[in-house]
Amino acid sequence: MGFINGIKEVAKSNLKRIVLPEGNEERTLIAASIINAENIAKVILIGDEADIKDKAGKLEISLSGVEIQDPENSLKTDIFANEYYKLRKAKGMTEEKASTIMRDPMYYATMMVKMNFADGMVSGAIHTTGELLRPALQIIKTGPGASIVSSFFVMIMKDISFGEDGMILFADCAVNPNPNENELASIAISTAESAKKLCNIDPKVAMLSFSTMGSADHELVEKVKNAVKIANSARPDLDIEGEMQADAALIDTVAKRKAPGSKVAGISNILIFPDLQSGNIGYKLVERLAGAIAIGPICQGFAKPVNDLSRGCSVEDIVNVVAITAVQAQ
Ligand code: ACO
């Protein structure tokens, strides 16, 4: 696939350290050996070293050159626990609890990223989205230019007349259940920046609604309109328009009728959904009914990259998400 192959090449050009906290998980181990052999990133596995090596032996894969760290006997565990305690004491964290929590590979790996022992993290082959995001939201937090963490999917359409040669970014389809107007504006800006960095496309952002340019009057439409105003005033350099319906965003003839003069309608390559219900339903419908390939969710807005996997992920999915995370870290 063109997009992923391009990402892998960029990842190889400037190797980043990506930590995988699910170091004892078989798909993760196979992916780590492939990433290492193809030189896509420097992988760090978290888990019991003897167990990992035993599993690698049974799987007949080589992990030579792959770093392994075990929070149970790492010298860093106490340092991380102390730092975590300092970060969270205002929220009721105690030194004792912090020391126990830091034995959890998810928290240990998140602290590795926070304290610059790794450049990014990928997890979720056995953990839920919440189990990955919660430590990252608490510890890594948002980076400059983003008020919230959000996510997007790169949708590769069969019909290449849509978006950028068939590539359209959908956001937010995985993180924020009900963003307010400021948060929606932040999602639009973050996704435009991600599109430039990861997909090399000139962002044309459509803020979706059931109304196009004032055709309906409702508080839900008002939220989207206000988000457009906030995004435009924060980033006048970006083409972010709305509110608009999906057909006006995507189809030239509809755009000419419903949104004449728009710089985005009819040619949009980024669709921003008003909430998680519409976003999550939207991407799954396009994936299943239109046969699109959905790559993601890719997180954005974190101070350092953290990405989630589906628990049904394949080895190839893990390799791809590590490559994407490595490029985000560059
Ligand atoms: N951006 C930045 N910070 C955030 C965000 C965000 N989007 N969401 C929460 N936070 C912060 C909070 O400010 C808080 O920080 P603090 O503890 O320092 O004050 C901390 O994270 C915890 O906040 P909570 O509101 O308690 O968040 P919670 O832990 O309940 O959940 C989560 C956050 C996991 C992201 C939740 O919103 C969620 O479950 N989202 C939906 C995930 C999901 O199920 N997606 C669909 C499936 S994925 C798929 O289909 C591909």
Image: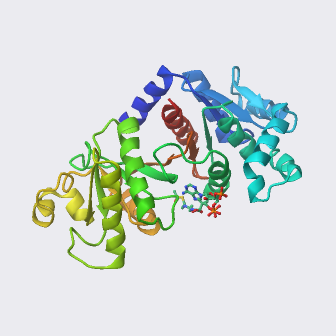
Q: Residue at x 68, y 42 (%)?
A: 110
Q: How many marks?
A: 0
Please, which colouring scheme is shown?
A: rainbow
Q: Quadrant of residue 2?
A: top left
On screen, residue 110 above or below 119 = below
Camera sees residue 284:
no
Query: How far from the left and from the top, in percent, is residue 249?
Result: 23, 59
Q: In the drawing, does residue 274 fall left or right of residue 68?
A: left
Q: Residue at x 55, y 45 (%)?
A: 302
Q: In the drawing, does residue 152 fall left or right of residue 48?
A: left
Which of the pair 277/234 is nearer the observer?
Answer: 234
Q: In the drawing, does residue 29 fall left or right of residue 205?
A: right
Query: How far from the left and from the top, in percent, is residue 67?
Result: 72, 26
Query: How far from the left and from the top, in percent, is residue 13?
Result: 47, 20
Q: Quadrant of residue 283?
A: bottom left
Q: Residue at x 72, y 38 (%)?
A: 23
Which of the pair 104/216 is nearer the observer?
Answer: 216
Q: In the drawing, does residue 52 fall left or right of residue 315?
A: right
Q: Image quadrant of ligand 1?
A: bottom right
Q: Quadrant of residue 82?
A: top right
Camera sees residue 175:
yes
On screen, residue 98 above or below 256 = above
Query: How far from the left and from the top, in percent, is residue 307?
Result: 56, 45
- Which corner quadrant holds the N terminus? top left
Which of the pair 321/301 is nearer the observer?
Answer: 301
Q: Residue at x 64, y 48 (%)?
A: 136
Which of the pair 104/113 is nearer the observer?
Answer: 113
